[in-house]
Image: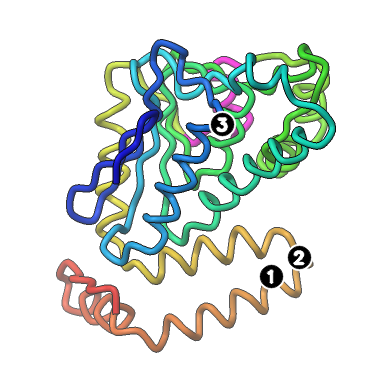
Amino acid sequence: MSFENIILEKTGRLARVVINRPDKLNALNIKTVLELIEAFTELKGDAETAVVILEGAGGKSFAAGADIAELARQGLLNGKEFSERGHRLCNLIENLGKPVIASIGGFALGGGCEIAMACTLRIASEKAKLGQPEINLGTIPGYGGTQRMARLIPRGVAMELVLTGRVLKAEEALSLGLVNRVVPHEELDRAVREMAEMLLAKPPFALKANMEAVLHGSEVSFEEGCRLETNLFAITCGTEDMKEGMQAFLEKREAKFTGK
């Protein structure tokens, strides 16, 4: 599959998606968003791919928000389509059924922050900056930012950030829980790869079940969430991977998971 604004690479069970507009700080124009939707749709249906890394090219920016020249042309009707397209991408990433690790090496602003928040895990370099500055352009986040941010960090802080447009440095983002880990800039690639390798060693169905339990369980009542957890737990009990994991523990050896 050929792309103009992104790169999609697969190495065994690991896929890497790169937003490749470094001269524009990887700003998200419509073509880039459509290519990302195409790439993640392919990865969702790819049985071999188990973990995905999402990053921005150039080392300065994950994605520095929407392409302002395009955004400025949006009106009432095409503005709705513009937002729905971003929601489609973020929902696809969030519900991929496989862990997606955001490698944040610089700016993750506006739509870039929204895409990062849709990822399963976020690892940032010490140079990373995250935020939703849309208020300064006379608008609001359109890719789910008002919703995901208030689910990831305290609602009062999320309210402050979207109302002021204040941009967070990496350490503050970590203290709030907006990112999972902050590492020295030169160690970002290694840290992301290590996390990917750790996840690749886990049983695929149990990974998916854990993500579904946390993601969807947090959106319903506690009782409904517990019912979802019980059902998913029961399903894992019927897998070969659970039997292997238990046997390996009892035999004091490394488990060899097959995804069955």
Q: Residues within 10 Å of mark 1 (few under 14, many from 20)?
A: some
Q: How far from the left and from the top, in percent, is residue 82? A: 69, 36
Task: Tell me the CA gap for discs 3 and 2.
Answer: 33 Å
Q: How far from the left and from the top, in percent, is residue 171? A: 53, 19
The foreground one among 227 and 136 is 136
Q: Which mark is residue 225?
A: 1
**Circle 1: element type:** helix
Q: How far from the left and from the top, in percent, is residue 110? A: 64, 24
Q: Earlier in the sequence, mark 2 or mark 1?
A: 2
Q: Mark 3 and mark 1 in contact (Cβ < 8 Å)? A: no
Q: Residues within 10 Å of mark 2 (few under 14, many from 20)?
A: few
Report the quarter where the C terminus lies: bottom left
36 is within the stretch colored magenta = no
Task: Tell me the CA gap for discs 2 and 1.
Answer: 6 Å
> Based on the displayed image, in which of its 4 quarters is residue 42 positioned?
bottom left
**Circle 3: element type:** helix
Q: Which residue is the site of mark 2?
A: 220
Q: Which residues are magenta?
A: 168-180
> Based on the displayed image, in which of its 4 quarters is residue 181 positioned?
top left
In the image, residue 181 sits, relative to residue 106, either above or below, namely below
